[in-house]
Image (tube, rainbow, N blue to C red):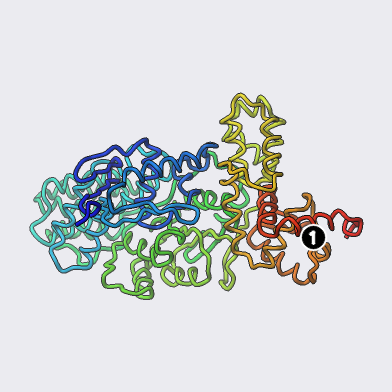
Amino acid sequence: MTTEEAIELRFAVLGPVRLWRGGQEIATGSPQQQAVVGALLLARGRAVSITELIRVVWGEEPPATALGTVRTYISRMRRLLEGTSARIDAVAGGYALRDEGLRVDAWDVQSALNQVTGSAADPIPVLADALAAWSGPALEGVPGTWAQAQRVRLNDLRVAATEALIRSRLREAGPSAREVDDLTGLVQENPLNEDLRALLMLALHRQGRRAQALEVFHTGRHLLREELGLSPGPALHTAQEQILRDDENVPARPPARQVTYLPVVLADFVGRRQELAELESALTGPGAVAGIVGMGGSGRSSLAVLAAHRLAPGFSGGQVYVDLAGPGGLDGVLEQLLRLLGADLSALPGREARAAELNTLASGERLLLLVENVSSLEQLQLLRQALPSAALLFTSLRQVHGMADVTWVRLQPLSPSESLELFAAVAGPERVAQETQACRELAALSGGYALAVRVFAQRVRDLPRWNVSAITQNMREEMAHPFSSGHADCDLLAAPVERTYSVLDPEAARIIRMLGLLPDQEYSAARIADLLRIPVHQVFFAAAACIDVSLLRECATEHHYRLSDPVVRTVMMRLAHATDGAREVARVQADHASDRLCAPA
């Protein structure tokens, strides 16, 4: 055995983020560095992009130094892993933690659940050991909305493991006093979770505490009525009937449990009133489907989360957030949904079987499903097959064709007033009040692209000694340069535009690049065709593809187009210089400047 193989490496995230090498605990750094550690661990081998890591640490308001700081955290982590079999690999646009020889407490809990559903062996020791790993709130001390969302998800894992353990105990000698205390604490943390409350009733009854068990029922009924205006569901009524009949047998199959897992709403969300109204109107009943379309950084995820929270009271079966860009893609989403609903995954080997089981578990439930990053008709069709009665709200880069009865909401740029409102929320209202006109000009430079508004406002906030006019001039000069300066702000702004551009076919990509070389104005299809020396029908098809992914906008005049915003123009200009070369760039710019092409189209 080599030295690398001999060193045991163990991480904990179910409580404070901690690390042990060979049994010796080692500090994991600042809360921000712990956020990076947690993101790589919970990705479990999946590559995490730089943009995603920046968002994990700072949310939608990263400082100008974010890129360099994340790289510093990665370098420090690599030093912590030296001499072990684990490593952090640099992959395209991000990093991946390779987990050879690595143990993580959250992985152990998930493995314990898998063993319970997939093995005939006694599940109790496995579950009891896994639950003993919890030492406090998951990712304790790690700030930010990402960490809070992970706490919600990991708490669902804790609830599922506790449910499995208590159900196993009830089939045998009954839960211990400590396990009942732990379950009581979980019910207090999740007072509207009817399945947990029903389990506590049965556990108390098994201990001979019949009156207390019925009191738990009455407390739950009161909370449901006062908080949600609902009556107790099947789980609570079944437990009450068993206790009243003095029947201690646990149901062989529990009813589907209510689940609530939504990310938090951005505190500084602004605008989108019309879009919110359209979504709330569309998603009023079972089987309704609505999609939010927009380029990365346009605010589509923030809008979807806010809409889901506002719609939540109408969906008593629960509200669930999943991301098709996460580990496992569509199969990973099906697995996550089944686990949340308490399914036995070992008996469901294929995608179709898992979709059918979801259909059974969620039948009749008023469930709202929020799905991020839908990219194909197949994904939507399978989700509708699995959850036909659920309302489905999803986000996508572009419209998915082939599915009827979808309400589409395409995100347009923020209005000038909305841009300034968001700018003030990030930079601070006092700064905007001091230099209102200069801030308005800098916000306008974003073209209403939400991510750009945030980045520009953060630069103002982080440079308190600069006047805003100087910052605006600095940004204009940066954006006019044909090559990236490597500044963190530039990389952050360019990343979602470049990802969007990468889905275009070569002809559409060439046309959108060339438009980045021209002044900010609208151009007719005929002028674009003349400039690029291609048939005009090719321009129509290419323009439609670019509009579909929100890089290009149609103007009021028919067959006239312009780039979506100044950030898109900057990225396209730089891609043209990098892809087409100086000679082609010079030719296009010279042809455009000639009298022949400058004549009105």
Judging from the image, what secondary structure is the residue with disc 1 in? strand
Q: Residue at x 16, y 48 (%)?
A: 180
Residue 78, horizontal then vertical, whole percent: 36, 46
Density class for disc 1 (Cα within 10 Å; few <14, some 14-19, many ≥20) is some
Q: Is residue 124 left or right of residue 17?
A: left
Q: Is residue 591 left or right of residue 271?
A: right
Residue 47, horizontal then vertical, whole percent: 43, 56
Q: Is residue 299 left or right of residue 32?
A: right
The correct choice, above or below, for 587 with respect to 224 in the image is below
Quadrant of the rendering where the N terminus is positioned: bottom left
- Residue 351, quarter of picture: bottom left
The correct choice, above or below, for 601 with respect to 134 in the image is below
Residue 463 in sight in this render: yes
Q: Nearer the viewer, residue 545 or 206?
A: 545
Task: Give the residue at mark 1.
Answer: 560
Q: Amino acid at mark 1?
A: His
